Amino acid sequence: MKKAAVIGSISTDFVVTTEVIPNQGETVVGESFQTFFGGKGANQAIALSRSGIDVFMLGAVGEDSFGIELLENLKTNAVNTEMIQAVAKSESGSAHIQINNGDNRIVIIPGANNLISIDVIKQYQKELLTMDLIVLQNEIPMETVQHIIDFCFEHQIKTIYNPAPAKEIDEEFIEKVTYITPNEHETALLFKGESLEKSLRRYPNKLIVTLGEQGAIFYDGEKEVLIPAHKVAKVVDTTGAGDTFNGYFAKGILDGLSLEKSLALGNAASALAIQAKGAQDGIPVYEKVAETL
Ligand code: RIB
């Protein structure tokens, strides 16, 4: 059975739903408050797990009550947690999310996620070398992200790099990953002042740009290929849609599907995910996704 590791963030999402977004200095009354399990890394690990892949998570939580629950949640979702450290004197990561009309604004407090250092990665090198694919994002320190990319490149381990949230990174690292999956906003930061068309042509069959309700696009060496998103009648919450997309895209790649088919899988899964509230609650199991293909 193919094995994947997700190296990234594990957080609690504190979610406020409000019809009115407050202006500076203003107080408004919102509709609801809930906590959910989140963190881009954990969300992507759970998407992979629900897709039926054997998945390991490398990350950190704080030694607080959130940390205990975050770990328990990953175990309940059949994610292997042996490479997750509980860090004393640190708070667990958290994300503070405002939902307005189904769309979101997010403030992240990294907490223990910021303690995933290069040294921590070095402790698990033996385990990482057994992986068929490593998935990473930008919610751990960038020097660690760069180290992982170098490590995977050196050892010829496939990588999916989801450069979210948007951060700058040298092109040398983009060259080294197998796939990079930014959204339009992240693409604009990575390739400043360049048209989408030009950026796509730079990295045929590697750069996949997600376009929200339009789907995902890449350049196949001859032409642009758009894999359309599924139509969703009622979008409830888009938080984590990109994570579900990446998790299921990774499943497609691990199963040896074509780029087109792997992206179609990602689109199908994320269309289901946005019909439920919370980043993880709506992540579908593979059987549900297969029904919509
Ligand atoms: O991609 C969605 C995730 O981003 C949320 O779960 C939140 O934790 C933020 O990190």
Image (cartoon, rainbow, N blue to C red):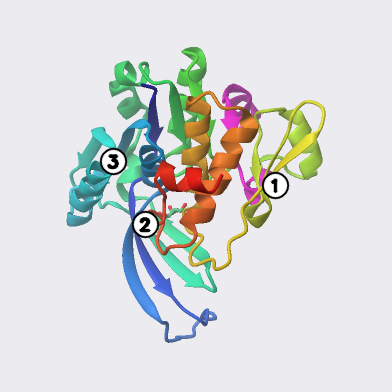
Residue 157 position within the rendered picture, expressed as x and y whole percent measured from the top left:
47, 18
Residue 28 magenta-drawn? no
Stretch in magenta: 170-189
Residue 158 position within the rendered picture, expressed as x and y whole percent measured from the top left:
50, 22
54 vs 85, left or right, is right
Say which mark, if any, is on residue 281.
2
Residue 272 seen by the camera: yes
Residue labelled with disc 1: 188
Q: For the residue labelled by badge 2, is the local secondary structure a helix, a strand or a loop?
A: loop
Q: Which amino acid does label 2 sit on?
A: Asp
Q: Are marks 3 and 1 in contact (CB under 8 Å)?
A: no
Magenta segment, principal secondary structure?
Answer: helix
Residue 176 magenta-drawn? yes
Q: For the residue labelled by badge 3, is the local secondary structure a helix, a strand or a loop?
A: strand
Q: For the residue labelled by badge 1, is the local secondary structure a helix, a strand or a loop?
A: helix
57 or 8, which lies in front? 57
If you read the primary sequence from the N terminus, does the residue marked by circle 3 or circle 1 appear first? 3
Foreground disc of the pair 3, 2: 2
Q: How far apart are marks 2 and 1 (CA)?
A: 30 Å
- Please name the residue shown 45% across and 19% down the image: 151
Q: Which amino acid does label 3 sit on?
A: Ala
